[in-house]
Image (cartoon, rainbow, N blue to C red):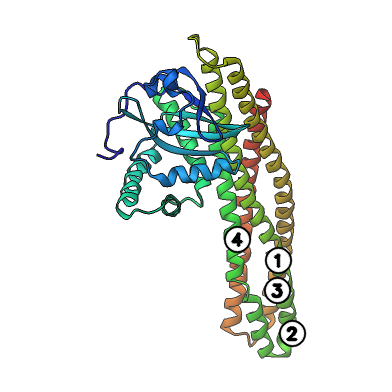
Amino acid sequence: MSIAEEVSSSDFLFDELFFSRTDKKGIIQSGNSVFKRISEFEWDEILNRPHRVVRHPHMPRGIFHLMWNEILSDHMIGAYVANKTKKGKYYWVFALVSPIENGFLSVRLKPSSQLFKIIKDEYAKFHAIEKDQKIRPEESQDLILSHITKLGFESYWHFMVEALMQELESREVQLEKSPIKKLQILREALKFGANLQQKSEEIALYYQNNAFISFNLEIHASRIGAAAISLATISSQYYLLAREIQFEINKFADAGKLLQEKIQECQFYVCNSILKKEIYELFESEVKPLPIDKSQEMKLLALLKDQQIKKANESLSFIKKEFIKFSNSFDNVKNLSIALEMVIIGAKIETAKIKTKSEDIISLINQLSVFKDSLKNGLREIEEYGLNLSKQTEEMSTLLEKEA
């Protein structure tokens, strides 16, 4: 029976979070009472033991290879993990592991999102491949990463951020709580950021597909002769203007992609700060005696919480600075598009003067007009997305400032 088919331990509830801390070698140094209870070990059985004592034997090794690679590189990582208890039960968690001084700290919550339902079935397949084909952990990791891209994620990092967001949102539903305001703002910001990036890239691509229209128009005008000299000149002006527009479009398309990356980075840190704050409050409320220095663990959890809020604020500051650059490029394109419109009007006037004009010239002029209209409409949409993104960013800044 695979871990996707087993029955989960009923002791782990949605309103519970737990953490454990290990040294650099993965030896358990501390944890909260929820961790101890769910593991079904006594403190003297689990402290100073390797963390793999709670590892489920059917977990794909590629996941742990990936996790160790990241945390040993001083990167945080989140992953779905199935753990086993002392009595042989098992439970799923979404584990968020943070590198700390002299070790690592992992905060876990009970997963319930649609993404989790997909992943736990995939884990069973990866474990079967590892077992049947006897592949190395690093090979299993590569298979997992390849599958993540097939699910539509650019990288494991993008998958991890979305999984964390979904789990927090789903957890609020399971607990019948109102949606977390910060998560709602992030969802809106991500939507507008994605739309802004997509529309910027669409305009850049549309220009590439129409880059030779003005050149073809100039060729046709030269065939007509002296009567179309003015039209040929206008075509040349259009070409130079369109090249300048392309340069600016590429700039704000790149800026749009960077903005979206930073929004996702902010999303990750905000989600982290929410979890760290809650685990801090839960641990603070514990009254049972613990065989660890609780005050030291409290300081560490508080430090991690504050670090995440600080990093989220840094991401927001970066977003604001980049948005200014984006806005400047946008204004440049907008001004150039107005000049482009005047050139096209001139081209239409000159075309009307030519008695021997061909259907090809008329068609090319119409194509220039279509490009101009598409650019104008695209810029209008980008402006709307940008204003909404700016609004969401400011709202998130206000909320984070209250916690800083």
Q: Which residue is mark 4?
A: 203
Q: Which mark is residue 229?
A: 2
Where residue 46 appears, as percent x and y from the top left, is 44, 23
Quick one: quadrant of the C terminus? top right
Contact between marks 2 and 3 (CB within 8 A): the answer is: no
Q: Which mark is residue 239?
A: 3
The disc labelled 4 sits on which kind of residue? Ile
Task: Depth check: give the residue in front, 171 or 55.
Answer: 55
Q: CA distance from mark 4 to mark 2?
A: 30 Å
Quick one: quadrant of the N terminus? top left
Q: Where, by quadrant of the figure, is residue 233 drawn?
A: bottom right
Contact between marks 3 and 1 (CB within 8 A): the answer is: no
The reply, left or right, for residue 179 in relation to residue 209 is left
The reply to whether residue 201 is in sight is yes
Tag 2 secondary structure:
helix
Which mark is first along the chain, 1 or 2? 2
The disc labelled 1 sits on which kind of residue? Leu
- Please tell me which residue is depicted at 66% across the width and 35% down the height of the picture: 311
